[in-house]
Image (cartoon, rainbow, N blue to C red):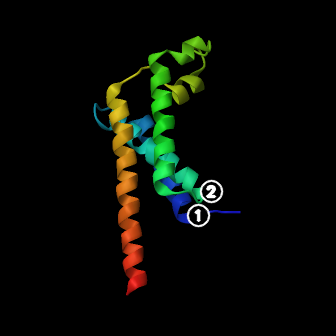
């Protein structure tokens, strides 16, 4: 069975950050955009904790998933499923569509791809030496 401890620790750290943002941040930048930015990175780290998948493929799948959830908000999926009174469904699926959320997800995925590329080049340069 595959398990990557570094990604798992990163995922736990990001999860704690997400909870703290949700519980204590009541501003107009970090709460609405930071959480969306970090959630894509969090999902990426969770997947990479348990599956040895290619970076670009994983980042793209996570981004597509995030876009799908956001677009479902445009169509009021929570209401269509009659879950408007279910607090957990509203937290997980969200209730309001925003194009800026799509941008935040995209920037999170882009950071993942850039960071992984830098990590790969650094590892390769150590091997060559």
Q: Classify 120 as above or below 102.
A: below
Q: Classify 31 as above or below 122.
A: above
Q: Which mark is residue 4?
A: 1
Q: Which of 11 and 27 is in front in this view?
A: 11
Which residue matches tag 2? Answer: 50
List x then y, in percent, for residue 69: 50, 29
| Residue found 51% across the figure and 36% down from its top | 65
Q: For the view shown, which residue lies furthest in the right direction? A: 1
Q: Nearer the viewer, residue 57 or 22?
A: 57
The 10 Å Cα crowd at callout 2, few under 14, some 14 to 19, many 20 or more, is: some
Q: For the view shown, which residue lies furthest in the left direction? A: 28
List x then y, in percent, for residue 97: 40, 21
Quarter placement of the N terminus: bottom right
Q: In this view, does 125 lie to the left or right of 65?
A: left
Q: In this view, does 96 lie to the left or right of 43?
A: left
| Residue found 59% across the figure and 14% down from its top | 85
The picture quadrant where one finds residue 25 is: top left
Q: Classify 61 as above or below 113.
A: above
Q: Classify 111 as above or below 65.
A: below
In contact (CB < 8 Å): disc 2 and disc 1: yes
Mark 1 or mark 2, which is nearer the start of the sequence?
A: 1
Q: Which of 12 and 43 is in front in this view?
A: 43
Say what secondary structure mark 1 lies in: loop
The picture quadrant where one finds residue 124 is: bottom left
The CA distance from mark 2 to mark 1 is: 6 Å
| Residue found 36% across the figure and 40% down from its top | 106
Say what secondary structure mark 2 lies in: helix
Is any part of residue 17 visible from this angle? Answer: no
């Amino acid at each position: 069975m595959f398990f990557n401890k570094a990604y798992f620790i990163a995922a736990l750290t990001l999860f704690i950050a997400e909870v703290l943002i949700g519980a204590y941040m009541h501003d107009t930048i970090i709460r609405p955009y930071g959480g969306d930015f970090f959630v894509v990175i969090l999902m990426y780290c969770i997947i990479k904790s348990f599956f040895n998948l290619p970076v670009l493929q994983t980042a793209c799948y996570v981004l597509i998933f995030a876009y799908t959830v956001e677009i479902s908000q445009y169509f009021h999926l929570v209401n269509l499923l009659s879950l408007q009174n279910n607090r957990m469904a509203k937290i997980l699926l969200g209730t309001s569509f925003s194009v800026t959320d799509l941008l935040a997800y995209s920037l999170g995925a882009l950071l993942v791809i850039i960071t992984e590329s830098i990590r790969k080049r650094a590892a390769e340069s150590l091997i060559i030496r």
